[in-house]
Amino acid sequence: MGLTIVEKILAQHSNQHAVKPGYIIDVKIDVRLARDFGGANVVKNLNDNGLKVANSHKTWFTFDCNPTGSDQKYAANQQACRTFARNNQIPVFDINAGIGTHLAIDEGLATPGSTLVSTDSHANILGAIGAFGQGMGDMDIAAAWANGSVWFKVPPSVKIIIEGNRNNNVYAKDLVLFMLKNFGTNTFLGKSVELYGEVVDRLSVDERITVASMATEMGAIALLIPPSETIVRYCHARSGRKVLPLFADEDASYEQVVKLDISGLQPMLAMPGKPHDVVIVEEEKGRKIDSAFVGSCTNGRMEDMRVAARLLKGRKVAPGVVLKIVPSTDEVWKQCLKEGLIDVFKKAGALFGNAGCAGCAAGQVGQNGPGEVTVSTGNRNFTGKQGKGDVYLASPATAVASAIAGHITCEMDIPTSPSIFKSVIEKTQHSSMDVEKSRREPIISGRVWLIMEDNIDTDMIFHNQHLAITNLEEMGQYAFGNLKGWEDFAQQAQPGDIIITGKNFGAGSSRQQAVDCFKALGCQAIVAESFGAIYERNAINAAFPVLTYENISALELKEWDHITIDLIKGVVTNCENKKSVTINRFSEVQMNIYQKGGLLIGNSETN
């Protein structure tokens, strides 16, 4: 039986002839990145555990979350990383460079068939060039820096065949939003997805990056696009190395093969708070907006800048509307200057920022305020992710057209006179609680929190405005502070509590704090129908119990019931009625890490 793309890459990087879904292997990592907010914790993990960097030539810092250094905690973290970098001969892509995953491609650090890890949850953007990229938590990255490898479970593979022709007014962002509309956030959870079809083959580097960057929003491990000859030439020119792309075997085994017809596809729009709640732009046409944003790792490339300039030339942003444009890298910024695009943007009334992640990072260009309605080219519009207002996701063409119109519209329907609206401000609040330490036992018991919601993302769990916090003792007060209806969780939680929840818990960011905030409160475990892939890894590595179930209705649980969980046998018992069910027990790897007290406990230096 042949191998899929991800199986070939992982097999080559684990010194195995072949691997299959479910195998847990030690994967050698070619490119090891840490960003400015995660980098400080990576450094802390290395120092606290007496670990050294195995190979500084494969290791980089990328400061893309706060390229201005305008926040004191970010500035402190960046300086800590710079100091560590100097002492360990580690290259730094500093605040003037741009988004780390883009730099990995454009600077030739990664090539087709290579492996990359980063504290960026969108590191799977490397699927754009047929490489394996993964966002991981601080412990994982520290382990990769120290050992040159990390453990990984081989994911099942899915093949999607895109059929039909793409209309002229349909962009790569519309294509991937259409995929989200059809497949949602759970269909491919924890799976590697390969994309095929004539439309896919013709995608440019920039378009492939747009599509691959939203694998995380689909819950997928990666969206892998087989490299075309154009991609191979691009990567060869950028890296200066011979490029040997990997392709799936003809007899490769896929868990599922899906065909998706894009004939008649129109400009698409993701509704606020849900990247998968996608409609055609026409359905929301006319809703007033306060701002628009073009940028992020999904749409900050040169092709996106040119689309924005084409629509803005000779036009003005609507009165009362703010248009923010942020390129993905300094190379794109300089090319915009060379082509005169910055002049077009400024004459139209747009703000043009430094290269970086921008709106996805708190305090940066692209964040919105309470009551603000934004059309954004970002990849994630979870509540609170890009600010406190409503965020629609769309292509650069739709975002810019809407900024000119003053209301949601597409590029084919920009009015001669803009709409003018009044803004509305909403109030928000946060909660806090004193910190307790958690226990660690093979059999645990405690009272139950029934939070039976799907797709609880990391911004709901631990808002990104608190990401600069590195002390665990400070994290508990912010747990679920952005989850509607549960904002007072931290105030009511007690040491020993156990959370039971729905599908895809922890979707989104790679932030370790979304695990550690529960540890800080003394919570003992989270039991969910499924977890976001990075979140599950972070919890396992932190020795915090996370378990999955298929059906627990037989327990007849009520709020505050007390339950017992046998982590080894995978048995949950309702202490109130003595009813029990079987859930998925700890794997050998999870139990080993749990008993050690964490991934990095007991690790020795490897050079």
Image: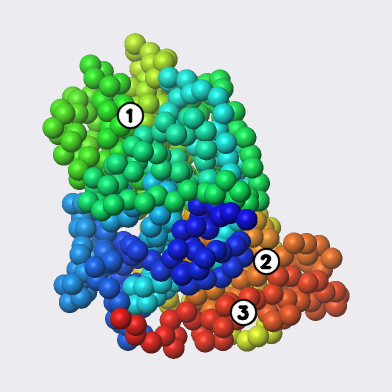
Identify the residue at horizontal 72%, vertical 65% (top origin).
549
Name the amino acid, label 2: Thr
Does residue 526 appear left or right of residue 92 in this picture?
right
Does residue 358 appear left or right of residue 510 in this picture?
left
Q: Total label count?
A: 3
The quarter of the image holding the N terminus is: bottom right
Q: Position of residue 136 (x, y in %)?
A: 44, 64
Relative to 139, is 604 above or below?
Answer: below
Work out whether residue 501 or residue 225 is closer to the camera in this orientation and state it: 225
The quarter of the image holding the C terminus is: bottom left
> Mark 2 sits on what residue?
548
The Cα–Cα distance between marks 3 and 1, rounded to whole angstroms, is 55 Å
- How dense is the environment of label 3, judged by Cα within 10 Å: few (below 14), some, or many (20 and up)? few
Numbered mark located on residue 224 in the image:
none
Nearest to N terminus: mark 2 or mark 1: 1
> Mark 1 sits on what residue?
321
The Cα–Cα distance between marks 3 and 2, rounded to whole angstroms, is 15 Å
Identify the residue at horizontal 57%, vertical 36% (top origin).
161
Dot 2: element: strand
> Mark 3 sits on what residue?
588
